Image (tube, grey):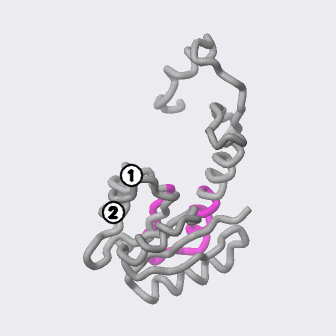
Amino acid sequence: MKLNCLIIDDEPLARKGLIEYVKEVEFLNLIGECDSAAHASSVLTQGGIDLLLLDIHMPHLSGIEFLKKLSNPPMVIVTTAFSDYALEGYELDVMDYLVKPIPFDRFLKAVNKAFDFHSIRTKATNRSGTIQEFFFVKSNGSISHSSFPLQRSSPLKEMILPLRGRKSR
């Protein structure tokens, strides 16, 4: 399985660097590169994009403004020279936030996170296109999930739901 990605950055050198990084990762498939959010909008309407590598500071429409306008965005990794927007980015559910210059190992960590998320989401989607319910268990630093069927009135589900959002100790 490959992730179809789109690079959106107004700086040609930044796009070139990201293109080189994408070529180094076997599970990434570069669909295109855009120098503006307006150009990216037309590419996204064609569908098939799994991951955006999105700059923030661009002319006319910032990456954050662009992301807010998308009704059903693909996964997003922010690639920017400014750390000021990290919190706002995470509030928009970005997968990761990379500050330029981006070391390859940091890029690789971010795209691996996106790939893992995409893999789990794909496995959780049944043939009818609906997402199955499952839960995650974190133990000794590793995360696993179970697609154990939980009914709406299940006592187990009533015990699990209140734990959402709690920090691990």
Residue 124, image x, y percentages: 68, 41
Return the residue nearer the eye: 110 or 71. Answer: 71
- Quadrant for the N terminus in the image: bottom right
Compared with 85, 23 (above or below) is: below
Residue 64 badge: 2
In this rendering, would 45 be left or right of 68? right
Kind of element beneath mark 2: helix
In this rendering, would 41 be left or right of 127? left
**Do labels 2 and 1 touch, CB within 8 Å?**
yes
Residue type for callout 1? Leu
Instruction: Tell me the residue that label 1 is attached to.
Output: 92
The residue shown at (53%, 72%) is 6
Instruction: Work out which residue is located at the far left of the displayed protein and give it.
Output: 60
Residue 77, image x, y percentages: 49, 63
In this rendering, would 40 be left or right of 74? left
Q: Is residue 44 magenta?
A: no
Residue 25, image x, y percentages: 68, 73
Return the residue nearer the eye: 69 or 156. Answer: 69
Compared with 50, 141 (above or below) is: above
Pointer 2 or 1: first along the chain: 2
Instruction: State how many labels appear.
Output: 2
**Residue 94 image-quadrant placement:** bottom left
Residue at mark 2 to residue at mark 1: CA–CA distance: 8 Å
The residue shown at (64%, 65%) is 3
Compared with 35, 141 (above or below) is: above
Kind of element beneath mark 1: loop
Residue 130, image x, y percentages: 62, 39
The residue shown at (31%, 74%) is 57
In this rendering, would 63 be left or right of 157? left
**Residue 110 image-quadrant placement:** bottom right
